[in-house]
Amino acid sequence: MNLRILSRLIGSLLFFPLASLGICLVCAFFFSETSETDASAFTAFLQSFLICLSFALILVLVGGKVRKNEVLRRESVAVVGLGWIFCIICGAFPYLFCDTGMSLPECLFESVSGFTTTGATVIDDLDRLPDSLLLWRSMTQWLGGMGILILLVAILSQLGASSISIFRNESSAFETEGLSSRIQQLAFHLLVVYLTFTAACFLVLWLVCGMGWYDAICHTFTTVATGGFSPHDRSVAHFDSVLVEVCIMGFMLLSSFNYLLYVWLFRKGDWWTRWRSDESMRYFMLIWFSFALIVTGYLTLFSEDTAWQTIMRQAFFQVTALVTTTGYTTADYDQWPSFAIILLLALMMVGGCAGSTSGGLKVGRLILFFKILFHQLRLSFRPNRVMQIKLNGHVVSQSFQSNTLLLLTIAGVSVLGGTAVVCLLEPEMTIRTCFSATVSTLFNIGPALGEVGPAKTYASLEDATKYFLSVLMVMGRLEFTAFLVLMIPGLWRSY
């Protein structure tokens, strides 16, 4: 491991959250004229900015100049995991320095939840926080949505060939078909699509839905990133607007598709060809619509006091928010019948398409898993037949199949092990709550069930539990391997 190169890359990476801190610092200055809480937030952001700037400059200066193609795969893999960790630490400073009454584990938990686009929170009363701090809270999710490392690849030409390793290890860019030596150009196109969605979502919420510009910005950042942070305690239910919910649903779904699809359309413009060949998107839409109808029908049968229009509105929004792993809420689904809750838990684990900003296992992996399963069943009675497994019209290599099965195995073990640890740390919580908290944080959903349900927060948990769930959020965001590889001693050996 070349620590000098690693220092340079991480230092360069920190300039992205540093720029966001600068924006929030300016906002806190202007907001301070009308708000005493933002006046104190200005000092907190100034301290955070100076500390992070000093830290970033030290790392860059220690690293020195990095020659093109000097970065090897080992440094590329390490910078993925460590880069997120360093950004999370910088993201916790505003919460720590601002007069919020939050402890260190709570500050780290909120920062982790932001950058990993999980949306879980330990803040009970959002209205008491400065507007600039809530803007920073939303901005961390926007930075983490597409992945700060994608920005690094798109902008820093000095990475050369190593950018391929970084791009593949960043979970937002999991499906990397068609990658070529012009990986930076592709990353730049992804960034352009992300910025376009951001601008479009803001304009729709502001001009069409009638949101204030501040609410529109905050909800744009967290909708496009499928994060789910809202500056209001009641989340999207605060607006009580069908138009707002429909628009947010639309952008949540768009952000859950493979962003490479949009790059394809930008280059070739052949939507129908891509739609026919993309199994993941078709199955994702089928799962979303089917589950929404089932939940609507089931709730209609067992909810005599609620109009079916209201049930349909709540069911479609909650199914969309959970299958896209955004985590917005318009209803306390923890009070729904058990069968509906089981369906929602299943949706939490499914997630969106590979190459999107959403979390979860990803639809493409689940499709591939069932294809491998049926393939092995067919081989049991036709062992001599040569059969190929295809996904999205392409033959899936044996190594890719093995990696998919390995990741699903790690995910299953993590859910069981995580539930056991949470039960151990929180003996008074039910296993239902412990399981849902593990699933919700590991797959970057946000709200869970029971004591950490949609109408509550994670503030009541022990500090040790908050630290542990923070680790699960990072593991889920990096899709396990990029995080677990940091634990292997061989990665850090010098050469």
Image (cartoon, helix red, strand yellow):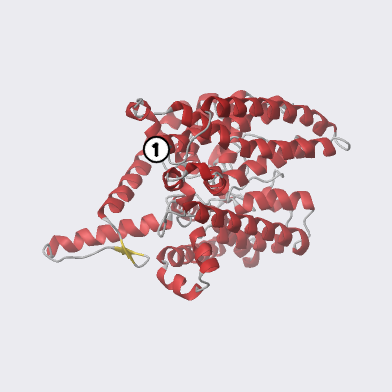
Give the vertical position of 352 relative to 233 (above or below): below
Q: Is label 1 in a helix, a strand or a loop?
A: loop
Name the residue located 24 percent from the left edge and 64 percent from the top edge.
388
Which amino acid type is shown beneath numbered disc 1? Leu
Q: In this orientation, which residue lies closer to the viewer: 164 or 215? A: 164
| Left or right side of 207 for 147 | left
Asked if residue 168 shows in the view, the reply is yes
Provide the residue designation for mark 1: 72
| Left or right side of 466 for 481 | left
Give the vertical position of 414 relative to 358 (above or below): above
> In the rendered view of the protein, which quadrant contains the N terminus?
top left
Residue 246 in percent (x, y) is at 65, 63
Total numbered badges shown on the rendered structure:
1
Task: Give neighbour class at mark 1: few <14, some 14-19, many 20+ (Cα, 10 Å).
Answer: some
Residue 203 in percent (x, y) is at 73, 60
Name the residue located 54 percent from the left edge and 45 percent from the top edge.
147
Name the residue located 56 percent from the left edge and 61 percent from the top edge.
253
Q: Residue furthest right?
A: 33
Residue 158 in percent (x, y) is at 51, 42
Asked if residue 447 shows in the view, the reply is no
| Left or right side of 30 for 307 | left
> In the rendered view of the protein, which quadrant contains the C terminus?
top left
Residue 364 in percent (x, y) is at 40, 58
Q: In this orientation, which residue lies closer to the viewer: 106 or 251? A: 251
